[in-house]
Amino acid sequence: MIVAAHQPAYLPWLGYLDKMAKADLFVVMDDLPFETRSFQHRQRVKLNTGVGWLTVPVEHGPRTERILDKRIDHAASPHWQRRAWRTLESHYARAPYFARYADELREVYERSWTDLVELDLELLALARRWMCIRVPILRASTLELAGTGTDRLIDLCKKVGARAYLSGSGGATRSLDAEQIGRAGIGVIWQHFDHPVYPQRYPGQGFVSHLAFLDLLFNCGETSFELMFPRSHPIHVGAR
């Protein structure tokens, strides 16, 4: 079994979903320390003025505060949900497939949220369903993982019965000790993701990559599946 893992992400980008789809099990690392100004609580979208950020306001806490303990700060920004939805509606309403997903997404932004991780997981659930990704997920907080860094990943793999760990190719290449994992009898697979290029709103700005997954769905609808998951790639997605 191949396992992949990553911190919770707000409106995850396509590479996040690609990593999930190429695993047999995806673990949401909700018990890691929260990182300020990270993709755990913000994401990029394309606006008529260029790239903009959608950000979830969070309460201040100690540097060791876990992601699963992070609370949304409604007092500091009481209208953040309304502003986020209006931003999406203003800049994507004329996208070809916005209407197909708008009602369910609007309902998320109209709901009351307390915990950041619950919001992130709800949006991830929408992404998985809309992209037909059937890979099961677990929250790391249910596994009582021991150690840090590579030791923690080894413990993760052993507890879920994985023979291989699928790692991202960014910062993980510097922090993960592949030789140590190999000595534990676990293989390492490095994710390779080719970001699709597709028609977007405001074409005069040129194509912008690494946006929220919504950008692809709003612009391409069902063809998003073929763009993200070519048939030649080994993935774990369900039939449409």
Image (spheres, helix red, strand yellow):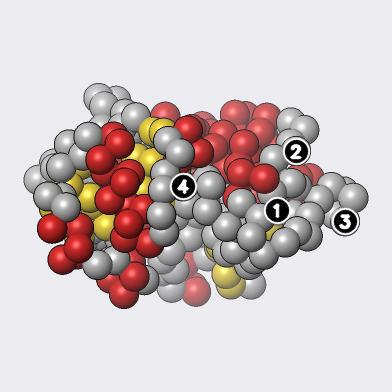
Which residue in the protein does label 4 denote? 29
* Nearer the camera: disc 2 or disc 1: 2
Point 25% across, 25% down: residue = 239
Amino acid carrying label 4: it is Met
Q: Position of residue 34 (x, y in %)?
A: 60, 58
Q: Does residue 91 sit above or below 225 in this rendering?
A: below
Quadrant that contains the N terminus: top left
Residue topped by disc 2 = 114
Q: Position of residue 195 (x, y in %)?
A: 30, 61
The answer for how far apart the CA atoms under marks 1 and 4 are is: 19 Å
Where does label 1 land, which residue? 56
Mark 2 crowd level (few <14, some 14–19, many ≥20, 10 Å Cα): few
Image x and y of residue 105, in percent: 61, 35
Using the numbered discs, state the Cα–Cα distance from disc 3 to disc 4 in whole angstroms: 27 Å
Distance between mark 1 and mark 3 Cα atoms: 11 Å
Helix, strand or loop at label 4? It is loop
Q: Are marks 3 and 2 in contact (CB under 8 Å)?
A: no
- Crowd rating for badge 3 (residues with CA inside 10 Å; few <14, some 14–19, many 20+): few
CA separation in Å, label 2 and label 1: 11 Å
Q: Earlier in the sequence, mark 4 or mark 2?
A: 4
Q: Give the residue pinned by disc 3.
A: 76
Q: Quadrant of residue 99?
A: top right
Of the residues shown, which amino acid type is indicated by label 3? Ala
